């Protein structure tokens, strides 16, 4: 099998009808890497994956393995010649074949001698802890076992690239965590280049070397898990990795320093100060400076767990009323609201470890370094009018203004 | 609790059981009784012995098989590739399906009469063949073996095709993709994945087509030569019953027909279980 250094996808686009399911997708994958495509349902993750395998033809763009072009949107190396392996969302095991025959399928096509097929299948089944299952049929197995057969069926061929399309999404929560560890251990052991598709940020953060966040077929951000988690490139990514509290406001004053910005905003009468670690040249910084000059709206992004609950003097203090409390064991998820008397109240999501009752007044404060600000994109402004902007979904605050 | 739930379910089954007994079991048992007796009710194997010793009647088995077996293979053999190519739908599928269903809805007699005029010596098919210089003299499509076979094709192919189409389009496209990703070419994918999964459907449609063709009667009379080359077994039975008014002999021939059909069906089912072991162990889902 030919080794490679990198797989390069250049400006790949896939059009269905008049919509691009994947738009202008460019990315490099390095050998041994674990890359995750993260995004909501329908954002084009599976389509991107299928385009890379060659299972669906691309509309435009190119794919290279090192210098060899395997797809230029007119001619392509067929999927069966690419030596990629794929695990499907529903596993796609052959129901008329036993576990052994499923795993041996690709080896037999490659005309390995019988003894070698037996040895390799045995090893692969051992790797996924399925010794003793060889004679069973897929329909006699649980979802988790089937998923492991699907993985064994791929890795037994030692693929150059392993593609996994939401392999854990059909499993229950406990099994999902277990198999996630196994996948991680397997990747450490085999070091096979992997592309993993998921809509679950926890999975993405736990497994990946790099995460690619997608929205409507477009790449939003590519970065390490830490990058994506603490330094999202835009409001969409922020919302997707758990930032809530997307309050719409304008910037009152803005100070630029080489390492970042410090901004003052006002949300329903409450003055808030934010220190943004956006270095010079960061597009987010340029966007905010522009928004400040134009006086156009910006949005905050603050994690519920970054809001300190309790009595704090001074900076960025908010006096909220708890509208809804959802007990979650080690902490409670609280949907509260604050605002001027008479004015519209602003919903705030926070987490509290101390017990809080609904209707209670809660003192909260936000560390200025934990607030992110993003200029509002035009389509978000439109979405805002429709009441579907990020951070606004879910339950509306109860109108408990007394 | 369990017992009462079971007897409740049993009560619901009663209408179906009564229906089956009245419609199938009783006539069959009565036919079997008739076939094993003489006209005055005494037990006798004479009806069977007579059939197997009368050369003219015995030959009908061979005549019928030589019509039914080839056309069943042709119908199912054609239906498999057609169903395969249309598994993800094609343009004009509705029109194709419509034209396939027409012969089924029109019924054997109408189709036979249509064939008699269109495919007869002066029908448009022969005129076309002559105009295109594909034939010098009119080709005989009717009143012979060929006529019966063509009519069974028109009647049987749509059944086989529609049934198999249901089977293939029910196979998840991901299985094909998975096979491709494992290195199989299109042809390998067909033979190693799709065909084995189609086997149950192929077996069922083969059985139905065979039974339909083996019991052929109207088209053998209308389009064939019922006195000789297409004197099928059903004609023999009919003649004993309604020309010689010997219902005992006719019943015996019907029983022999049923036995041959059962034999062929068992052969097909054995083939199917050889080919498709998966189904015998499918427990859930
Ligand atoms: N064969 C197709 N024909 C037309 N549109 C398609 C086709 N396949 C996908 N799409 C569209 O392309 C978009 C992306 O689909 P895709 O299956 O890649 O989403 P996804 O990110 O994998 O979603 P999920 O998480 O639900 O699997 C969707 O809007 C879908 O409707
Ligand atoms: Mg998908």
Image (spheres, coloured by chain):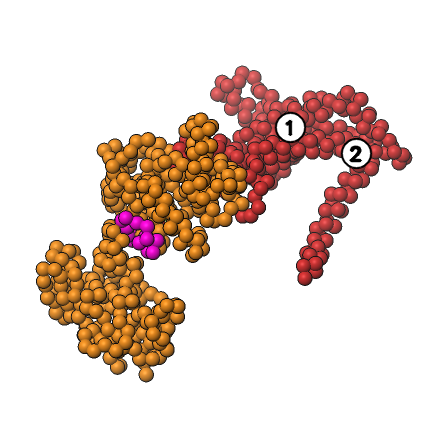
Q: Colour of chain B?
A: red
* Quarter holding residue B92: top left
Q: Where does label 2 land, which residue?
A: B251
Left or right of residue B209: residue A1: left
Q: Where does label 1 land, which residue?
A: B68
Instruction: Please state the total of marks drawn on the protein image.
Output: 2
Quadrant of the rendering where the N terminus of chain B is positioned: bottom right
Q: Colour of chain A?
A: orange
Left or right of residue A370: residue B175: right
Q: In the structure shown, which secondary structural element does the residue marked by tag 2 occupy?
A: helix
Dot 2 falls on which chain? B
Residue A10 position (above or below residue A178): above
Residue A376 position (above or below residue A25): below
Q: In the structure shown, which secondary structural element does the residue marked by tag 1 occupy?
A: helix
Where is residue B63 shown, x and y percent of the image?
Answer: 69, 23
Dot 1 falls on which chain? B
Where is residue B97 shown, x and y percent of the image?
Answer: 51, 39
Magenta segment boundaries in residue numbering: A201-217
Q: Residue furthest top?
A: B136
Residue A65 position (above or below residue A264): above
Residue B23 vs residue B141, the one in the foreground: B23
Where is residue B18 shown, x and y percent of the image?
Answer: 74, 50
* Quarter holding residue B77: top right
Where is residue A49 shown, x and y percent of the image?
Answer: 33, 44
Left or right of residue A143: residue B41: right
CB at disc 2 and ligand 1 closer than 8 Å: no
């Amino acid at each position: 099998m030919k080794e490679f250094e990198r797989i390069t996808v250049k400006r790949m686009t896939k059009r269905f009808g008049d919509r691009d399911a994947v738009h202008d997708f460019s990315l490099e994958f390095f050998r041994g890497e674990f890359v995750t495509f993260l995004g909501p349902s329908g954002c084009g993750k599976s389509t991107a994956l299928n385009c890379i395998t060659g299972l669906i033809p691309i509309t435009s763009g190119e794919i290279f393995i090192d210098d060899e072009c395997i797809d230029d949107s007119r001619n392509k190396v067929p999927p069966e010649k690419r030596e990629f392996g794929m695990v499907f969302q529903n596993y796609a095991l052959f129901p008329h074949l036993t576990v052994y025959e499923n795993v041996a399928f690709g080896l037999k096509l490659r005309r390995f001698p019988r003894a070698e097929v037996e040895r390799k299948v045995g090893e692969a089944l051992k790797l996924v802890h399925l010794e003793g299952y060889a004679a069973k049929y897929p329909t006699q197995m649980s979802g988790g076992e089937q998923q492991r057969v699907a993985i064994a069926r791929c890795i037994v061929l030692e693929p150059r690239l392993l593609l996994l399309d939401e392999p854990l999404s059909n499993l229950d929560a406990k099994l999902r965590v277990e198999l996630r560890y196994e996948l991680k251990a397997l990747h450490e052991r085999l070091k096979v280049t992997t592309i993993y598709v998921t809509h679950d940020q926890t999975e993405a953060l736990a497994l990946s070397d790099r995460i690619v966040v997608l929205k409507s077929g477009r790449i939003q951000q590519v970065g390490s898990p830490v990058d994506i988690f603490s330094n999202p490139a835009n409001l969409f990514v922020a919302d997707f990795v758990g930032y809530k509290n997307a309050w719409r406001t304008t910037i009152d004053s803005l100070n630029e320093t080489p390492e970042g910005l410090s901004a003052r905003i006002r949300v329903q009468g409450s003055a808030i100060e934010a220190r943004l670690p956006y270095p010079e040249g960061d597009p987010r910084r340029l966007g905010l400076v522009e928004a400040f000059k134009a006086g156009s709206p910006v949005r905050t992004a603050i994690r519920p767990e970054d809001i300190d609950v309790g009595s704090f003097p001074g900076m960025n203090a908010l006096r909220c009323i708890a509208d809804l409390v959802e007990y979650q064991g080690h902490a409670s998820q609280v949907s509260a609201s604050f605002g001027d008397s008479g004015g519209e109240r602003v919903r705030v999501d926070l987490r509290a470890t101390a017990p809080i009752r609904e209707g209670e007044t809660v003192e909260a404060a936000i560390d200025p370094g934990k607030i992110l600000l993003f200029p509002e994109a035009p389509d978000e402004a439109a979405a805002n009018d429709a009441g579907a902007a990020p951070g606004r979904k879910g339950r509306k605050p109860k109108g408990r203004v007394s | 609790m369990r017992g009462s739930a079971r007897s409740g379910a049993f009560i619901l089954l009663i209408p179906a059981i009564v229906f089956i007994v009245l419609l199938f079991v009783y006539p069959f048992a009565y036919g079997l009784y008739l076939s094993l007796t003489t006209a005055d009710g005494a037990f006798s194997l004479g009806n069977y012995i007579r059939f197997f010793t009368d050369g003219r009647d015995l030959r009908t088995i061979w005549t019928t098989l030589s019509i039914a077996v080839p056309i069943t293979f042709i119908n199912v053999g054609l239906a498999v590739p057609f169903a395969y190519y249309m598994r993800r739908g094609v343009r004009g599928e509705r029109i194709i399906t419509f034209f396939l269903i027409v012969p089924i809805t029109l019924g054997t007699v109408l189709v036979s009469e249509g064939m008699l005029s269109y495919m007869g010596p002066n029908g448009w098919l022969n005129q076309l063949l002559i105009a295109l210089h594909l034939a010098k003299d009119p080709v005989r499509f009717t009143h012979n073996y060929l006529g019966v076979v063509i009519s069974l094709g028109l009647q049987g192919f749509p059944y086989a095709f529609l049934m198999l189409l249901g089977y293939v389009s029910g196979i998840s496209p991901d299985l094909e993709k998975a096979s491709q990703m494992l290195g199989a070419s299109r042809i390998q994918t067909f033979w190693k994945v799709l065909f084995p999964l189609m086997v149950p459907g192929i077996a069922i449609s083969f059985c139905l087509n065979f039974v339909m063709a083996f019991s052929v009667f109207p088209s053998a009379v209308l389009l064939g030569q019922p006195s000789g080359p297409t004197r099928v077994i059903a004609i023999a039975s009919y003649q004993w019953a309604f020309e010689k008014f010997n219902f005992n002999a006719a019943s015996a021939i019907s029983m022999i027909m049923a036995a041959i059909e059962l034999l062929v069906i068992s052969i097909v089912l054995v083939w199917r279980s050889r080919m498709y072991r998966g189904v015998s162990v499918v427990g859930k889902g």
